[in-house]
Amino acid sequence: MTAQRAVLFYVLGLGLLWALIPTLTFPNPPLDVVEGFAWGQELALGYTKHPPMQAWLLELSYQFTGGSDFGGYWLSQIAIGLGYWCIWELAKRLGLSDWQAFWSVVLTSVTFYFTLPAPEFNPNILQIPVWAGMALFFHRALEKGWLIDWVLLGAIAAFGLYSKYFTALLIGSIGLYVLVMPSARKCLATAGPWLAACTCIALLTPHIIWLLDNDFLTFAYAASRSRGAENWLAHLTNPVSFLGAQIVNHAGLFIVVLAGLGIAGVRALPDKLRQKPYRDKQVFLLWFAFVPLAVVLLTSAVTGNEFKHMWGTSLFVLSGIVAIRFLNLPNNWPSPRRALIAALVVQSIFLSITLGQALLEPLWKTKHTRIHYPGLKIAQTLSKAWRDSVGTELAYVAGDMWPTANITLHAATRPSMFLQHDLTLSPWIRITDVQQKGVMLIWRGKDERLPENLARLYPDAKKDGSLTLPAHSYGTIPPISLSWAIIPPGSVAQNVVNE
């Protein structure tokens, strides 16, 4: 079998398994997927937490599948599959053989970020093909000088920024590489880099205008997710914690490498590496494998900020190439077959954990889980309560994100999520339309009183109903309780911005 055919079978097989298992067994989509579906139907140029690309793609999948919610699982695998293709192509461009490129994909695939988080299609998953693709097309642009590669680089950069602003770190790393490396600096005298920049800016302009119109709403969320230093020690512990988590996330890669080496291979490896001179293209690989990570660690050390570990997803798309390149694998493996078996075992373990989350978690969990939330039943019950009371279809739901987003996704009429009844957090909402159609206020639990933020807007409102539903058909997860108040057309509060 050729390496090309092997990598195709491997990637397609993994993608089908990672898409089918959650499609067939998850009763409800994960957190970011539900939230993305709720935003996506609005087709806005930006949302409360993120740029719009993830939500747009989820809405596209919703329409393509005839109103089903499993599209996110397949979108994740499409994104990861595109990332694998870019890794394969880049590995060969960096001088690796076809079989070394195959193993680069395999080693990347067993790192944590390509496994358990995969069913939750979110901006982090979308960064995988963006970072791998930008590295590939930047390398092609430098080597060939073709304008089409520069245009594609700019377009992918814009796509990345529409997905998550973290892409700016890679854009900065590319710019710094051009300035530092004499061989790359020559491109500044050509039209290519400037064409890439113009392409990116032109495509990003609509979102920039949206940011200006909405007081940089998504930047405020990004800042809130990075916790500041609590004391001087945080300047040391936070970057160390982030780096430590990234090392642990590579456990699958280490297992496969060691399985292929065996004890004898580990002992012989130092001597073999001394006999193998490195090739010229190592600087490019090392730069994009480690410079973005170094910037994150340095930023955390200087500011003391704690970065979310999952932000490391895109930083390590080149890990497999680095391992193959600098350990000279599979040439230094006494048993590549054993390494492949180890990779399949690692994948089987992660797939089993995902299956277990769906089928076995309810047997022992005593806390609510996102994928076992009875979102469809809640949406059907509350939609009926609205129709029975008002005589129209439910058009708007207001409250905190999780219950309102689930109603937005699962209700047949797909009401809009009016997050916290706050126009600042939901700039796509037109209050005049809400006034004409009314809004249902949602809160968790069975309290008779409305939550404080809603009670300020509706001091005289009373609870109109509540429900309690089992979280799952079996197991120990406690039931879900929700309450609601119906605000009919013409009675919607005009003061909709939280104080």
Image (spheres, grey):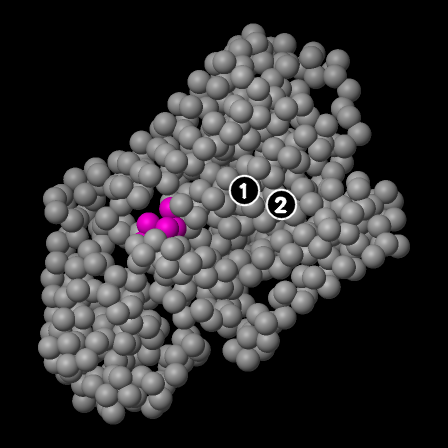
On the image, the x and y values in percent for residue 28 come to 26, 52
Q: Residue at x 34, y 90 (%)?
A: 494
Type of the residue with mark 2:
Gly
Residue 268's place in the image compared with 237, above or below, is above
Is the C terminus in the top left, top right, bottom left or bottom right quadrant?
bottom left
Q: Residue at x 52, y 23 (%)?
A: 6
Q: Is residue 174 magenta?
A: no
| Label 2 or label 1, whichever comes before in sequence order | 1
Location of residue 155 (image quadrant): bottom right
Q: Nearer the viewer, residue 406 or 362?
A: 406
Dominant SS type (magenta): helix
On the image, the x and y values in percent for residue 221 come to 48, 66
Location of residue 378 (image quadrant): bottom left
Left or right of residue 41: residue 210 = right
Q: Residue at x 38, y 46 (%)?
A: 73
Q: Of the numbered discs in the image, which one, if any, rests on residue 82? A: 1
Instruction: Give the class, few, some or many, for how many residues have Cα within 10 Å of label 1's Cα (few <14, many ≥20).
Output: some
Query: Marks 2 and 1: CB-CB under 8 Å?
Result: yes
Residue 143's place in the image compared with 336, above or below, is below
Q: Is residue 72 magenta?
A: yes
On the image, the x and y values in percent for residue 305 come to 55, 57
On the image, the x and y values in percent for residue 59 come to 40, 60
Type of the residue with mark 1:
Leu
Residue 168's place in the image compared with 244, above or below, is below
Q: Of the numbered discs in the image, which one, if any, rests on residue 133? A: 2
